[in-house]
Amino acid sequence: MKVSPSLSTLFPELFNIPRPVISGSTPLIMNASLLILGDVPMFPIVEGNELLPVVDNETKLKKYPAIGGYPVLDAIMKTEPKEYQKLLMTKSQDMPIWIGTVKFSDTLDDVLRIFETTRSGNVVVEREDNNRTILSLKDIAELFEVDKIRSDLRVYDVGSQKISAPKDTTIVGALKVMFDNKIRRVFCPSYKNERLRFVSSRNLIEFLFSPKSLERCKENPESWLDEKVSTLPGNNATQISDEETVNQASRLIGKKSDACLVSNVSNRVISRWDIVMKSWKLGGLQS
């Protein structure tokens, strides 16, 4: 892409799209449960109706606080079972993730550079009138779906290794695989042996913050992460030819935020991160 298009050109209606926010003083148990609703991967944190930014000393990026499912799971993994109840009642503002900022006049390249730096698929977009909103990786992937951004790269160019776990893997085991490999989905067949079945970080949030599971955590915290992931509701990846373009991959991936594809020959995984970020890094974007 010789000249990267501006966000105002690519997303002229961005500031008209409703984006949910949460109160930083609300406990984690309530805000994490909200992540289950509406297929929302993260919420910006507000206090007094204002987002409170900081400047990262290392990257010099202006960042805003948010809460997301993957960091919540990371916090659970770092907490002793006897402290789970204390963690669940922690104010969300005390355990935020930080997402970068761009101007509405900035370009797509600017956004993707921040995604690469922060390893987060979300940015805060600021307008000259001080209005702010969120732009996500999913929003950008949808540009591929309608050919507003195009690439000649093929599925085999951008796929990632498919990471699997045995069917008797527990939630804690699946989380270890995710964090060790820096991934958000693990392929794990149920007892029906579906080859393309996976559980995502979102599936784990949905289970752990269900009323039944939270009651189990309260009564027997040691057992909260003991459920076998093969018994959990999971997802099935869609199969795609290695020769398809990334634009076609974007059309096949579906609408769910944790959806992915698996290539039919190389058996590699294609996520929205692969479609957008790898296409960009390999210099394959056209507008």
Image (spheres, rainbow, N blue to C red):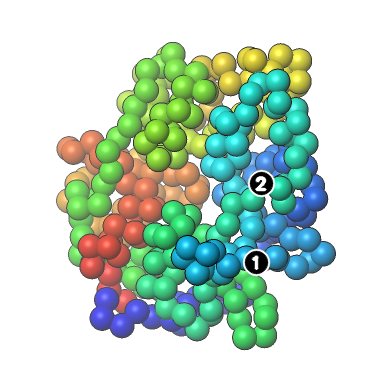
In x, y percent, where is residue 280? 30, 65
Closer-to-camera residue (255/203): 203
Secondary element under disc 2, as helix, strand or loop, is loop
In x, y percent, where is residue 130? 67, 80
Q: Quadrant of the N terminus?
A: bottom left
Asked where in the image residue 27 lies, by quadrant, the reply is: top right
Tell me the residue at 34%/59% (across/down). Answer: 277
Q: 78 above or below 154?
A: above
Tell me the residue at 44%/18% (across/down). Answer: 169
Mark 2: amino acid: Met
Q: 148 above or below 199?
A: below
Q: 61 above or below 242?
A: below
In x, y percent, where is residue 198? 42, 31
Crowd rating for badge 1 (residues with CA inside 10 Å; few <14, some 14–19, many 20+): some
- Judge whether residue 230 can be spotted in this image: no
Secondary element under disc 1, as helix, strand or loop, is loop
Closer-to-camera residue (141/192): 141
Q: Quadrant of the C terminus?
A: bottom left
Disc 1 designates what residue?
53
Closer-to-camera residue (105/146): 105
In the picture, measured across the screen, residue 251 lies left or right of residue 87, that is left
Give the mark, 1 or 2, whose residue is nearer the N terminus. 1
Give the CA distance from mark 1 to mark 2: 14 Å
- Judge whether residue 226 can be spotted in this image: yes
Disc 2 designates what residue?
95
